[in-house]
Amino acid sequence: MQPLANVTRLQPASRAGSIQIKNVGQVFKTSTQSVEALSDVSLDVKPGKFVVLVGPSGCGKSTLLMMLAGLRKQTSGTILINGAPIVAPDPDRIGVVFQEPSLFPWLTAEENVEFPLTLRGVDKAERRRKAQEALLLVGLDGFAKRHPHELSGGMKQRVSIARGLVQDPPVLLMDEPFAALDEQTRMTMGDELLRIWAATGKTVVFVTHSLTEAVYLADEVVVMSARPGRIVDHLTVTLPRPRTYEMLSGDAFGAMRDRIWRHIRKSA
Amino acid sequence: MTISSTTLRRMIVVSLILCWEILPRFHVIPELFLPSLSSTLLAGWTDAGEYGHALMVTLYEVAVSMVFACGGGIIAGAVVGSLPRPRVLIMPMVSSLYAVPLVILYPVFTVWLGIGSESKIAFASIYGFLPTMLATAAGIQTIDPQLLIAARSMGATLTQRVTRVIIPAAIPTVLSGLRVGGALVIVGVVVSEMLISSAGIGYLISRYRTILDSAHVFAGVLLVLVLAVAFNAIIRFVERRAAIWQTGTHAGADAAGGDAPAILPATA
Ligand SMILES: Nc1ncnc2c1ncn2[C@@H]1O[C@H](COP(=O)(O)OP(=O)(O)O)[C@@H](O)[C@H]1O
Ligand SMILES: [Mg+2]
């Protein structure tokens, strides 16, 4: 684990990172039918919060994240990030980590992390420096020259996280980033993520289908119903930080997980 | 002692060359069917001027056809592979055309273009064009759409997506298409020279065949062989240069099937 003094440099002085979702809806139109994926979703996220989205499969979690990332336009409603609407992908404000690491196989880990900077014409030395910092932050500084096929699943996902962090966006969106990992890797990655989050103070919106993971990571858990997706519960996790493995078997933890599960069972 | 496959391969080539020399020499095979290597080389050497001139003609035709077949094939394949409408319209046609023995068209080309280089170039270009185009189209269609979404989330413009994602991702498939397309160009040129023509190596081969001069026939065959081997060596060199890209074909193979839709059409 890296000393915090090394990693806090990534954090800007500002406390940007607020998210406001107001009455957002999404309707998918195909030639034969139209599908209402999301209906009237409103959510306020304070800067620096760790928010986890859960809900039955197909309830529109990915769709919501896509809209937050500027990768898809909502059919109705508004989305503000840092107080400004989001109309196109903006890596200065938002970093995205997908379920599949989505690394470019022809680039090294370092070049993959540099990619968003390369797109904007940042000069080579600066790119290298920032990529090194981001790789250090995810604990992969020794693997900069490896290609993705030389990395394990967990390491690839760390590179992907580093790539999401390299421009130091105040908001990080993560769509089931650990779903393809085995359980042990998943646990350690969760702890790593919490460490990075604590060190950088970013706002994180995290999608998972694991209720344990949701309660373990979150400040707030947002529960969505089956299609059309709506927010049916919004609970604050009161467990102290840092979270520990022992908390998983505590009563408070179990009660929160049960509450979420009841919602999901009802709507699925 | 174990023999590496490279050594084994060399040994096979050397013993084939030895057989070529020894078998005809000791009249195991009549010289009319297979002249010995030394008499073949001698025939080529005594008429070096004639063969040199023929080689220049053939090389010229191969080079020009290569440009048309490979350049045209890559451009057409890129268009067809990336736009759904032309793909639906054209691909089935091209695929079935691929199965037609195109050589039946060659006499028509000589009627249109004469028996000079033009008709050979036209025929060989079309002959090599199809596999190059099919491979390029396939290469572009099989690009992991998740990579393009990731690039977009990092703010890549359309041009950047083409130059930094689509082209590098398609390179391995395009190269394998070039290998087949280029080989077919050589076949197309030589075959058309053998059928109806007045110059080139194929012409020499078929002219010497009619006067039963086996040594001169085989001198021509040897030249074509050298040409094909040289082409293969060039492609191999390029492939090694792009070796890293080969790993691109494994992209996303380890991703678990989640509930995220595979393709989200671009809207932003
Ligand atoms: N591009 C699309 N076209 C049509 N329907 C879509 C598209 N993307 C998602 N959907 C539908 O929208 C719903 C929500 O999908 P998604 O956001 O992927 O759900 P989740 O991530 O919560 O599992 C699903 O029913 C899905 O079939
Ligand atoms: Mg999803």
Image (cartoon, helix red, strand yellow):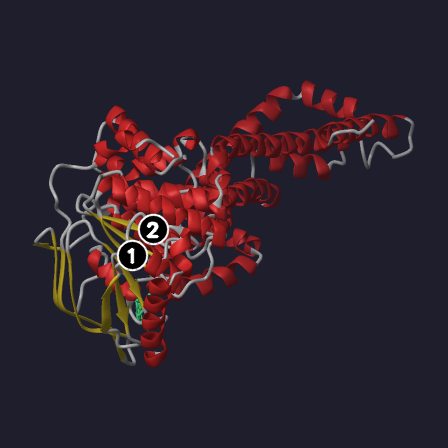
* Contact flag, marks 2 and 1 (Cβ < 8 Å): yes
| Label 2 in the same subunit as label 1 | yes
Q: Residue at x 42, y 63 (%)?
A: B258
Residue tagged 1: A239
Task: Please state which of residues B90 and A207 is positioned toward the viewer in this rendering.
Answer: A207
If the picture is divided into quarters, which one holds ligand 1?
bottom left
**Mark 2–mark 1 distance (CA, rounded to whole Å):** 7 Å
B55 horizontally vs B16: left or right: left
Q: Residues within 10 Å of mark 1 (few under 14, many from 20)?
A: some
Regarding residue B249, the answer to whether it shows in the image is yes
Percent coordinates x, y for residue B155 in the rendering: 22, 46
Q: Is mark 1 within 8 Å of ligand 1?
A: no
**Which numbered circle lies on residue A125?**
none
Label 1: which secondary element:
loop
Quadrant in which the N terminus of chain A is drawn: top left
Between A47 and B22, the one nearer to me in the picture: A47
Label drawn at residue A243: 2
What is the chain identity of the residue bearing mark 1? A
Q: Element at badge 2?
A: loop
Q: Which amino acid is tagged 2? A: Arg
Q: Quadrant of residue B195?
A: top right
**Residue with the most extreme left position:** A83
Q: How many marks?
A: 2
- On the image, the x and y values in percent for residue A112 come to 35, 38
From the viewer's perspective, tell me whether residue A63 is left or right of residue B71: left
Residues packed near mark 2 inside 10 Å, few (<14), some (14 to 19) or many (20 plus): some
> What type is the residue that disc 1 sits on?
Leu
Please name whichever residue, B249 or B102, is drawn nearer the observer in this view of the structure: B249
B155 to the left or right of A148: left
In x, y percent, where is residue B264?
Answer: 31, 62
Specify whether A23 is left or right of B233. Answer: left
Using the rendered image of the protein, determine whether residue B116 is visible from the camera's viewpoint. Answer: no
